[in-house]
């Protein structure tokens, strides 16, 4: 396809898939259970953190986390007194990892009214640098070494898919009824695509991406192509690429 044809094709697919029906099978349905900003942030962050593998398994595990948090994530982390949590396992993410994240979140909300305020306090800088600032802050809490792998580091070559998905949920406009549009510290134009196996494979088939690895370099190359198509909201194409890969087997 020529560039104009490709843009028109992806614009159409993005508009089709950015619809409330998308929520029915997507992990974003978990934060959609809540109404308060802080509850949504916590539910979204924890869900995104375990969002790898089978989607049904992700949804079941995320729902179990919300049950452990008593259905009130913000109240839970604010009143958490480091008592043992119920056993929890999602692939390599275990109870110790959830405990560590609850401790980090408690400290964050003790110092900031919400996550958006935390990112405002980081000042100017790329989204990758803000991810690293958040990662560094969370890692100040006591943790096992293996917990660190659940917080990707984009400055060390990671595409940080789960962080970028979480940021998309929080930043992009809520008008379509899918994302939340809760944060002002980051603009939609600054976001990076949540690059995974589906979006990567479709991007390669459409010749938007040449690099075989789905790493930071691949993400930067794909981001550059998508920003040319829509400089103000490049990550809307996540819906198109993901939808083509998962639902249309493109």
Image: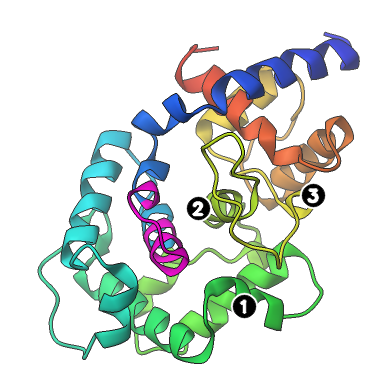
Question: Residue 240 — which label?
Answer: none
Query: Which residue position is annotated with label 3?
Result: 189
Query: Which residue position is annotated with label 2?
Result: 162
Q: Distance between the residues labelled 3 and 1?
A: 19 Å
Check the image and report above or below for 245 versus 50. Answer: above
Q: Position of residue 142 (x, y in %)?
A: 35, 89
Asked which quadrant contains residue 53, the reply is top left
Nearest to viewer (mark 2 / mark 1): 1
Residue at the image position 53 percent from the left and 63 percent from the top:
152
Query: Which residue position is annotated with label 1?
Result: 117
Residue at the image position 47 percent from the left and 64 percent from the top:
37
Q: Quadrant of the C terminus?
A: top right
Q: Where is residue 51 in the image (x, y as percent from the top left)?
A: 39, 48
Q: Which of marks 2 and 1 is nearer the N terminus?
A: 1
Between 139 and 60, the one nearer to me in the picture: 60
**What are the residue bounds of the magenta stretch?**
31-44
- Evaluate if marks 3 and 1 touch, with contact meaning CB atoms under 8 Å apart: no
Element class at badge 1: helix
Q: Distance between the residues labelled 2 and 1?
A: 20 Å
Q: In this view, does 234 lie to the left or right of 65?
A: right
């Amino acid at each position: 396809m020529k560039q104009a044809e490709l843009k028109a094709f992806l614009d159409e697919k993005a508009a089709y898939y950015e619809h409330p029906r998308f929520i029915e099978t997507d992990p974003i349905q978990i934060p959609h259970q809540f109404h308060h900003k802080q509850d949504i942030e916590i539910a979204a962050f924890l869900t995104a953190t375990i969002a790898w593998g089978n989607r049904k398994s992700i949804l079941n595990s995320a729902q179990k986390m919300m049950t452990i948090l008593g259905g009130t994530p913000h109240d839970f982390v604010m009143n958490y007194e480091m008592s043992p949590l119920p056993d929890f396992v999602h692939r390599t993410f275990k109870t110790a990892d959830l405990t560590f994240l609850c401790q980090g979140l408690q400290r964050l909300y003790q110092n900031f009214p919400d996550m958006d305020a935390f990112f405002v306090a980081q000042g100017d800088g790329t989204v990758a640098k803000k991810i690293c600032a958040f990662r560094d802050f969370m890692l100040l809490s006591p943790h096992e070494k293996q917990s660190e792998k659940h917080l990707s580091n984009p400055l060390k070559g990671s595409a940080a898919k789960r962080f970028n998905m979480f940021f998309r949920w929080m930043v992009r406009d809520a008008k379509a009824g899918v994302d939340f549009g809760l944060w002002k510290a980051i603009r939609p134009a600054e976001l990076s695509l949540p690059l995974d196996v589906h979006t990567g494979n479709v991007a390669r088939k459409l010749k938007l991406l040449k690099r075989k690895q789905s790493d930071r370099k691949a993400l930067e190359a794909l981001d550059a192509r998508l920003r040319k198509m829509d400089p103000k909201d490049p990550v809307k194409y996540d819906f198109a690429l993901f939808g083509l890969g998962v639902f249309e087997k493109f």
